[in-house]
């Protein structure tokens, strides 16, 4: 019998729970049996959720892509890496000769390690010299990240450690479903509750998270900024302001106070769908508590006013001075495994490593210096993820290189996106499973998965963690970073990508981020192996890493954070006689994002095999819909078919559908492609919908 123990961390969400995968074989040629055990660590404290427990299944499945595949007459056929690289270079060169450098677009993801994300950004700017690069984090973190930068001067998911949560006397959970999306964090909140904390949840429906709340504000989809205006108004009127903190560490209070005077609480109640008395109760509970924390996630952020909505929640934090000390702070609950690091090192259209800005001359000069190029060679900023899809439609972009995302299922208005992707002259997808987007590709490059691919990832606390590789690559799969280095060589830019070890890339990233906002300079692989992760910013080798931000001031002019006046914004698409219901979208416990990985796991599929629509029984009755039957959902952009699931816990004007399925159950065929004006986040969480029973026509 042989036994192999692989120390790793879960590939899914931002908690990055540490775990061990144990491979047992009764004889040399017997089929291995796998067991997963959690490993104690500072974030999950040794817990694993159902997805982590089963995360070996999709990696060890027979459905892995093992060889480069090229589409010939509609079928994928195996080719060699040499052929694959030759095809890419010849297509890219031809297209660039005809249409210019910006004809190639790159599209990355928040599952990539810091090293691969960094290298993808560098590959775009140095190997291809295109301005068009963006990533799926645009749909995930952009509202909270842009709000954090504007208000605090820095964006890091949580401003403090998870360990601080139990010291909060009042916790606001706005548009976050931790029970299903970061389940191993729930005990932090239940522990706070046991110590007497009151919890306020803001969500249009009841979830495992709202169930632990003392007060649940069942907000109308898209009306969080308005609701927050109501709470702010109560705080000011009741004098629950930390005036010393406001005077010393913020700007904009007088404007905010005057702005709030214009609002009427009854009107806010009407607009937001939350009774005035409940708004008051929530404001009083948070305002009167000695300590408190506010968390937001995609419910508040994936809106066409997501940036401003988050800023209004930050107003709550700042007016009450509840930040920078134990039991106080703000958290944008990061989503993907490396959602945090993936947004710091240059795969976003306007960013260079370390959160430097591509349009800032000093930042350009610094990074160009590290990369050994002239700053004038760096392109300017490109456009956001969905705008890349729009440019593809207009054939401004004719080739797309996707690494670590499934844009066909995760972009809004999926029918439009599919039409565009089909217009491309050349689509390359680097993945380890056959995603819906990969099916449309001309060329698929097989990559290694988390068990085989080492590198660093930064969890939701801003803690950088090292994940070591534990298995050999299957078939001819290569690491993402390896592909980028080899391709750069073929494009005659190999001297800038001369890396043989992933650690060498990290060491260059450390330099490139040095002195930037997300400064990783003091973090080394050696430290990561010795310590249980290191928080950024960490500017020097002997720096412990910043566990709690803003203890004395904000990295803003005069050390002061910015208060914001926010209007009562309405969703971009309103209900009508034809489309009478609101559709909101999100997640369930068992599946992850577009489901490419979790739909390959038999244990997870056994729990949720298909999509569904959560609907209030009263609403269902109105539209002649029975429980557990197939229904047709239609918006102004598309149609999907899912099974109904009755729940008296959802608002009667709202229907919820998860995002984890493709094709005829791809909820993004319905969603609206209006973008937030500041951060370009789509409004995934509201559009107008029509529901009808699916009856066969005889
Ligand atoms: N099981 C599981 N876990 C995951 C993921 C997954 O796919 N599956 N994905 C990971 C990723 S990348 C992310 S970004 C996170 C996402 O984590 P969350 O943001 O917590 O997840 P969502 O389900 O998208 O949305 C959260 C809640 O917002 C509510 N909501 C909808 N509309 C509104 C609104 O207008 N206002 C308010 N206040 N709430 C609203 C929904 O009902 C839902 O309960 O989860 C991470 N963890
Ligand atoms: N309607 C609606 N739409 C949404 C959302 C919503 O709440 N509602 N949420 C949005 C959010 S928050 C997010 S984060 C996006 C996510 O959207 P996507 O990025 O499209 O989601 P994933 O399913 O994670 O796709 C990742 C793909 O990369 C592959 N992959 C995983 N790890 C690696 C790796 O290390 N290297 C490479 N090369 N490939 C890898 C996987 O097999 C998978 O095919 O969806 C967004 N779309
Ligand atoms: S999905 Fe998230 S909470 Fe669950 S085991 Fe993985 S990292 Fe931990
Ligand atoms: Mo996300």
Image (cartoon, rainbow, N blue to C red):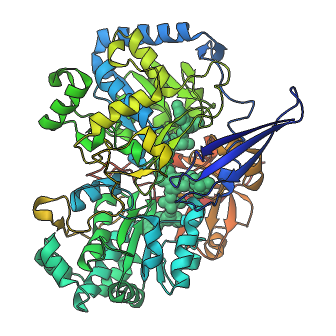
Viewer-closest of 212 and 265 = 212
- Decide: is 677 above or below 243: above
Q: Position of residue 683 (x, y in %)?
A: 40, 55
Up-down: is 608 above or below 67?
below
- Of residues 629 and 36, which is closer to you in this image? 36
x and y percentages locating residue 356 in the rendered image: 23, 41
Picture coordinates of residue 9, whole percent (x, y): 59, 46
Looking at the image, residue 26 sits to the left or right of residue 623; the answer is right
The answer to whether residue 379 shows anywhere in this view is no
Q: Nearer the viewer, residue 508 or 635?
A: 508
Residue 425 against residue 300 in the figure, above or below? above
**As displayed, is residue 97 above or below residue 383?**
above
Image x and y of residue 32, in percent: 82, 35
* Residue 293 placement: quadrant: bottom left
- Asked if residue 615 shows in the view, the reply is yes
How many numbered marks appear?
0
The image quadrant that residue 34 belongs to is: top right
Q: Is residue 75 left or right of residue 370?
A: right
- Residue drawn 63% across and 59% down? 589
Quadrant assignment for the N terminus: top right
């Amino acid at each position: 019998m042989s036994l192999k123990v692989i120390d790793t961390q879960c590939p899914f969400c931002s908690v990055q729970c540490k775990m061990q995968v144990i491979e047992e074989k009764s004889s040399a040629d017997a089929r291995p049996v796998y067991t997963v055990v959690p490993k104690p660590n500072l974030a999950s404290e040794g817990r694993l959720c159902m997805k982590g427990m089963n995360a070996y299944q999709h990696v060890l499945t027979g459905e892995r892509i093992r060889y480069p595949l090229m589409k010939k007459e509609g079928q994928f056929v195996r080719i060699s890496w040499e052929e694959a690289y030759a095809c890419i270079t010849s297509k890219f060169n031809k297209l660039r000769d005809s249409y210019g450098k910006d004809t190639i677009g790159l599209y990355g993801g928040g599952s990539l390690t810091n090293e691969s994300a960094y290298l993808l950004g560098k590959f775009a700017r140095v190997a291809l010299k295109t301005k068009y690069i963006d990533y799926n984090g645009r749909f995930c973190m952009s509202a909270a990240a842009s709000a954090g930068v504007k208000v605090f001067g820095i964006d890091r998911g949580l401003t403090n450690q998870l360990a601080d949560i139990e010291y909060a006397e009042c916790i606001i959970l706005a548009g976050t479903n931790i029970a299903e999306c970061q389940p191993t964090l729930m005990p932090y909140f239940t522990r706070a509750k046991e110590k007497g904390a009151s919890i306020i949840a803001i969500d249009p429906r009841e979830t495992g998270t709202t169930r632990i709340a003392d007060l649940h504000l069942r907000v109308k989809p898209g009306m969080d900024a308005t609701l927050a205006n109501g709470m702010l108004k109560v705080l000011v009127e009741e004098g629950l302001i930390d005036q010393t903190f406001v005077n010393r560490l913020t700007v904009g209070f007088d404007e905010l106070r005057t702005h709030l005077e214009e609002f009427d609480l009854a009107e806010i109640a009407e607009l937001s769908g939350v009774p005035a008395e409940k708004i008051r109760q929530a404001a009083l509970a948070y305002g009167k508590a000695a300590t408190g924390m506010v968390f937001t996630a995609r419910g508040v952020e994936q809106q066409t006013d997501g940036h401003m909505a988050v800023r209004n929640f930050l107003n709550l934090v700042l007016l009450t001075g509840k930040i920078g000390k134990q039991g106080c702070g703000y958290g944008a609950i990061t989503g993907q495994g490396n959602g945090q690091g993936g947004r710091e090192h240059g795969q976003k259209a306007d960013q260079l490593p370390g959160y430097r800005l591509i349009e800032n001359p000093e930042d350009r000069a610094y990074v160009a210096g590290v990369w050994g190029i002239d700053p004038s060679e760096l392109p300017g900023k490109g456009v956001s993820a969905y705008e890349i899809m729009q440019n593809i439609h207009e054939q401004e972009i004719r080739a797309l290189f996707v690494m670590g995302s499934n844009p066909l299922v995760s972009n809004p208005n999926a029918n439009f996106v599919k039409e565009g992707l089909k217009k491309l002259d050349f689509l390359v997808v680097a993945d380890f499973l056959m995603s819906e987007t990969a099916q449309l590709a001309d060329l698929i490059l097989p990559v290694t998965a988390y068990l085989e691919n080492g590198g660093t990832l930064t969890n939701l606390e801003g803690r950088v963690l090292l994940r070591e590789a534990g298995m050999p690559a299957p078939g001819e799969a290569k690491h993402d970073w390896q592909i980028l280095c080899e391709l750069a060589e073929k494009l005659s830019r190999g001297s800038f990508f001369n890396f043989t070890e992933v650690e060498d890339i990290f060491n260059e990233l450390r330099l490139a981020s040095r002195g930037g906002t997300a400064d990783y300079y003091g973090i080394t692989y050696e430290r990561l192996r010795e310590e249980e992760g290191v928080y950024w910013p960490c500017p020097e080798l002997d720096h412990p890493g910043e566990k709690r931000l803003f203890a004395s001031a904000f990295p803003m002019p005069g050390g002061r954070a910015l208060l914001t006046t926010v209007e009562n914004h309405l969703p971009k698409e309103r209900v009508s006689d034809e489309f009478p219901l609101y559709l909101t979208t999100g997640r369930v416990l068992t599946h992850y994002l577009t489901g490419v990985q979790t739909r390959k796991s038999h244990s997870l599929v056994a729990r949720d095999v298909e999509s569904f629509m959560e609907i209030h029984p009263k609403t269902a009755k109105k539209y002649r819909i029975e429980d557990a039957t197939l229904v047709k959902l239609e918006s102004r952009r598309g149609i999907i078919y899912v099974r109904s699931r009755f729940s008296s816990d959802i608002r009667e004007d709202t229907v919820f559908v998860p995002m984890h399925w493709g094709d005829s159950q791809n909820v993004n065929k319905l969603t609206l492609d209006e973008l937030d004006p500041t951060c370009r986040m789509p409004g995934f969480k509201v559009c107008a919908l029509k529901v009808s029973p699916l009856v066969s026509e005889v």
